[in-house]
Amino acid sequence: MNKKKIKLEQKWLIAVAVVVVLSATTGISDTTLQKTFAENYSVGTISTPSVSNATTFKAVDPNQSTNKEFWINTVHLDGMTNVHPGVKCDTCPQNTPLHPAEQPPANSTIPTGGGFRITEPNKVGAWDFRSFTFAPDQIVVNQGDKVTLHFIGVQGAHHVITVDGLGTFTLQRGQIQAISFVANSPGTINYYCHVHMPNMVGQILVLPKAAA
Ligand SMILES: [Cu+2]
């Protein structure tokens, strides 16, 4: 093994070590690191980092109709906290997390409509702020696509959902209801829940076909 090659391998090993240490100390995702590593260090090209051509992109052709399926969960985000600070407990089997005390806002400006809910502090000071939403709430399709939306009742006792131009239905927790349509016209189609306005809303963006 000649001297130059040994030096090259040493550099490569150092690069690997740096990546491992970075991964352990910064919490940067493995995928990001691997991609960065692949872009900058491949054996034999250590001194000339270049943009990788490993990632290939497929162009979207709006003229080509496809079947598209989406699974839309009905969910709520909960911010739970307490008016009392967390207490450290060294003898407890499970440590209580340290957390500063938080009071609910005195004069709430939460919109009416059912989409938001604030639960005032209970007897141990716990309180909760809730926001209902669809996941996902933004969908993009191409004109001509055959689209199926599966609405899934995950959280919330029930929802009354309208997809503009397609219908209204009730969705109970544990139910899945599907709506299928062909996205004939470019533009937007809104979907929303009557029980949880104004924030439980979503939008389907239909991209126009390119001119022939
Ligand atoms: Cu709802």
Image (cartoon, rainbow, N blue to C red):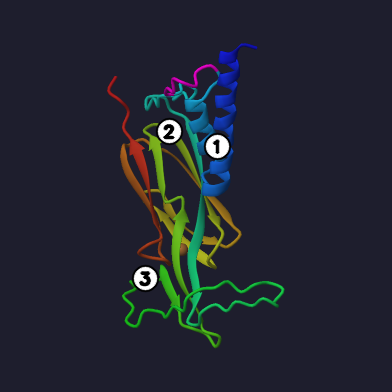
| Number of residues whose C-alpha sits closer than 10 Å to that of mark 2, classed few (under 14), some (14–19) or many (20 or more) | many
Horizontal and vertical percent for residue 144?
39, 31
Amino acid on which disc 2 is placed: Asp
**Which numbered circle lies on residue 145?**
2
Residue beneath the point at 56% across and 59% down: 154
The label on residue 19 is 1
Dot in front, 1 or 3: 1
In this rendering, the answer to whether 183 lies above or below 195 is above
User: Along the line of sight, which residue is nearer the eye, 151 or 95?
Assistant: 95
Q: Residue furthest top?
A: 2
Q: Give the x, y percent position of residue 182.
A: 42, 37
Residue at position x 31%, y 37% from top?
186
Mark closer to the chain start, 2 or 1: 1
Magenta span contains residue 193: no
- Label 2: state its secondary structure: loop
Q: Which amino acid does label 1 sit on?
A: Val
Amino acid type, callout 3: Gly
Quarter that holds the C terminus: top left
Question: Which residue occupies 34% across, 78% down?
Answer: 108
